Amino acid sequence: MSWKKIVEESLGPEDKIQLSYPGELDGVYGIISMSMRKLLFIIEKGIFRKSFSLVLDLPYEKIKSFRTVGKYNLIIETEDREHTFKSQDLRISIVEKALREIMEQEPS
C-alpha cells in the first residue's frame, strides 16, 4: 500500500491532503502530510520493498504551539509531547509557513 493511500484512509470524508514533505519525525524518516484538519506522519521502511505505517495522526486543535529551530527543525508541541520534524530538502521556514497557513484556514 502506498503512503498516499494510508493518508487518504486516515482522513474524514470532507478532508483532503494539502501538502506533504519528506523528512524525519523524532529521528525516523518518512513523510509529513498536512490536511485541512490534521497533521499526519507516515514512516517509510525498506529499500526495494517499501512499506509504510502511520505513526502520527494529530488533529490541529491538539497542537499547542510550533516553532522553528535552526534552518531545518520544526518543534511541534502538544499537551503531553514535543515532536521534532527535520526537513531533508527544504528550509524549515517553508514547512512552518505552510502549516501555519493551513491551520489558519477554516475547514470546508
Image: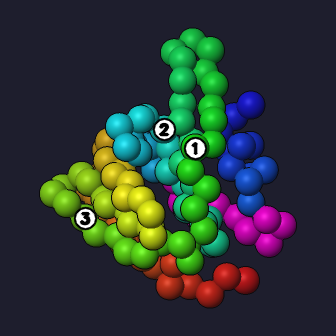
Kind of residue at disc 1 = Val
Q: Which residues are magenta?
A: 12-20
Work out which quarter of the rendered image holds the N terminus and state it: top right
Residue 104 is labelled as none
Q: Residue furthest right?
A: 13
Tag 1–tag 2 contact (CB < 8 Å): yes
Q: How is the image coloured?
A: rainbow
Position of residue 64 in the picture relative to residue 11 (left or right): left
Q: Residue at x 37, y 43 (%)?
A: 26
Q: Give the labeled residue for mark 2.
A: 30
In the rendered image, the vertical position of residue 25 relative to residue 82, given as above or below = above
Q: Which residue is mark 1?
A: 55
Q: In terms of sequence position, does the residue under pointer 1 or pointer 2 come before the other?
A: 2
Residue that mark 3 sits on = 68
Which residue lies at the image location 53% right of the left edge and 36% below the top edge?
43
Q: Is residue 15 magenta?
A: yes
Q: Is residue 98 above or below residue 21?
A: below
| Residue 28 x/y as whole percent | 41, 35
